[in-house]
């Protein structure tokens, strides 16, 4: 990586980013930082209403849909938490990566944002280089080339589309964070992955995210298991962590 703030890898530079912040000058500054790092497509919305209108319009054409959301929390009207909830209700964006960039930095706020399905939570003020690196890390994790199919006891996961095909023929989508957690477990299939290691891989730290991880594991089991209360694929190894068991 090169450049003033670190030029991002070529395969990430064309990702379409929507930045939502009611502080116009700050939004313009962030967009300038991202453009300087190599991101070619950064749009700005100064309210949740404006953001939803832009998201809806672009979603009509898959090739134009946003691929990352960078959201403030404290905005007039609909705040960033509610906005992400609305975004997650849109079929095209149930698993699109999102992160919060906000001055609202209490531990409860971080847990709330991550539980809603955000992939990272960055406090203002921030270092431009850190912002670029963490956005690139989210994109790298979410758009990494994967072995596209994972066969489990009661489902099949397509990492390329973030879809889970269940035994009854129904299909559900993984959120970006669910996709990331399952990807880490899939790369270590058959081996125990500790809670600390999962938190470190998915949030960049092993401190403070245990409850959020447990919530994501619970929702993952609801999607991939025939009986989430007695999991056959995503199993708990008491006192150690989790293990993914592939079919066969």
Image: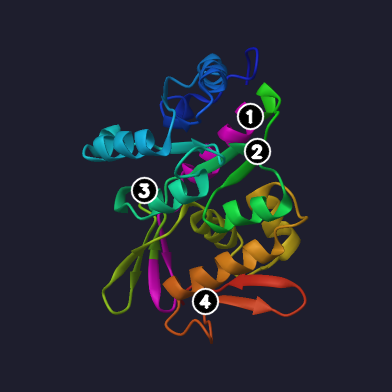
What residue is drawn where x is 41% and y is 38%? Answer: 48
Residue stretch rendered in magenta on the structure:
131-156
Can the viewer see residue 146 in this picture? no
What residue is drawn where x is 63% and y is 69%? Answer: 214
Q: Where does residue 167 sit, x and y in percent of width and height?
A: 32, 78
Disc with the residue nearer the chain's start (4 vs 1): 1
Residue 20 or residue 17, whichever sits in front:
20
Is residue 151 covered in magenta?
A: yes
Mark 3: few/some/many CA within 10 Å (<14, 14-19, 20+): many
Of marks 2 and 1, the one in the foreground: 2
Q: Where does residue 5 sit, x and y in percent of width and height?
A: 65, 18
Q: Secondary structure at mark 1?
A: helix
Q: Which mark is on residue 122? A: 2
Whole-angstrom CA distance, mark 2 to mark 1, is 8 Å
The N terminus is located in which quarter?
Answer: top right
Of marks 2 and 4, the one in the foreground: 2
Which residue is tagged 3? 93
Whole-angstrom CA distance, mark 1 to mark 3, is 22 Å
Task: Look at the picture and state if 160 lies above or below 170.
Answer: above
Q: Is residue 135 left or right of residue 239?
A: left
Which residue is tagged 1? 131
Q: Which mark is on residue 233? A: 4
Q: Secondary structure at mark 4?
A: loop
**Decide: marks 2, 1 in contact (CB < 8 A)?**
yes
């Amino acid at each position: 990586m090169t450049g003033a703030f670190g030029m991002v890898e070529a395969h990430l530079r064309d990702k379409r980013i929507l930045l939502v912040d009611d502080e116009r000058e700050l939004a313009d500054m962030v967009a300038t930082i991202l453009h300087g790092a190599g991101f070619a497509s950064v749009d700005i919305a100064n309210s949740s209403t404006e953001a939803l209108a832009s998201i809806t319009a672009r979603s009509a054409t898959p090739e134009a849909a946003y691929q990352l959301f960078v959201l403030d929390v404290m905005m007039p009207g609909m705040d960033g938490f509610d906005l992400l909830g609305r975004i997650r209700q849109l079929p095209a964006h149930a698993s699109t990566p999102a992160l919060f960039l906000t001055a609202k930095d209490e531990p409860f706020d971080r847990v709330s944002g991550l539980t809603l399905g955000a992939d990272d939570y960055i406090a203002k003020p921030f270092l431009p280089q850190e912002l670029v690196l963490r956005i690139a890390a989210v994109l790298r994790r979410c758009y990494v080339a994967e072995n596209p199919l994972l066969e489990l006891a009661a489902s099949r996961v397509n990492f390329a589309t973030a879809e889970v095909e269940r035994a009854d023929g129904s299909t559900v989508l993984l959120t970006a964070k669910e996709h990331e957690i399952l990807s880490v477990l899939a790369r270590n299939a058959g081996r125990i992955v500790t809670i600390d290691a999962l938190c470190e891989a998915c949030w960049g730290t092993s401190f403070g995210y245990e409850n959020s991880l447990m919530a994501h594991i619970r929702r993952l089991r609801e999607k991939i298991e025939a009986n989430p209360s007695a999991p056959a694929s995503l199993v708990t190894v008491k006192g150690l962590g989790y293990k993914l068991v592939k079919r066969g």
